[in-house]
Image (cartoon, helix red, strand yellow):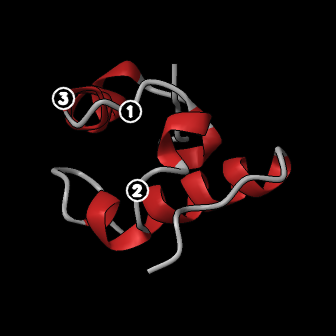
């Protein structure tokens, strides 16, 4: 399951729920599935602000993955 960090670097279920639901509804339940979407497509999902996108970018890069090019 995808995760991003909440405030103070702690993962909080309450902060992650809307993001996880939006990602799951769009068919993204792991990092590899994000490679089929552009960053803009993910940014348009509920709860996907700059911090969430930054965390996803970093997680993808950590695994030598990236969003689909435009």
The answer to whether residue 8 is above or below residue 11 is below
Crowdedness near tag 1: few (<14), some (14–19) or many (≥20) residues, C-alpha within 10 Å: many
**Distance CA(mark 2)–CA(mark 3):** 13 Å
Q: CA distance from mark 1 to mark 3?
A: 7 Å
Q: Which mark is residue 51?
A: none
Choose the circle earlier in sequence order: 1 or 2: 1
* Callout 1 touching callout 3 (CB < 8 Å): no
The C terminus: image quadrant: bottom left
Q: Position of residue 35 (x, y in %)?
A: 55, 51
Q: Quadrant of residue 37?
A: bottom left
Question: In this figure, which residue is indicated by the disc labeled 1?
Answer: 28
Element under disc 1: loop
Q: Secondary structure at mark 2?
A: loop
Please tell me whether mark 2 or mark 3 is closer to you in this view: 2
Residue 37's disc number: 2
What residue sits 73% from the left and 53% below the top?
A: 65
Determine the image quadrant of residue 41.
Answer: bottom left
Residue 3, percent from left and from top: 52, 31
Residue 10 picture location, percent across and down: 59, 33
Q: Work out how far the residue at label 1 is from the one at label 2, CA to CA, in angstroms.
A: 9 Å
Q: Residue at x 55, y 62 (%)?
A: 67
Residue at the disc numbered 3: 25
Q: Residue at x 56, y 65 (%)?
A: 54
Label located before the other in sequence (2 or 3): 3
């Amino acid at each position: 399951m995808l995760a991003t960090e909440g405030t103070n670097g702690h993962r909080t279920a309450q902060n992650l729920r809307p993001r996880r639901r939006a990602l799951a509804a769009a068919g993204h339940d792991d990092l590899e599935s994000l490679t089929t979407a552009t960053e803009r497509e993910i940014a348009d999902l509920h709860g996907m602000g700059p911090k969430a996108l930054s965390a996803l970018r970093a997680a993808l890069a950590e695994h030598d993955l990236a969003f689909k090019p435009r």
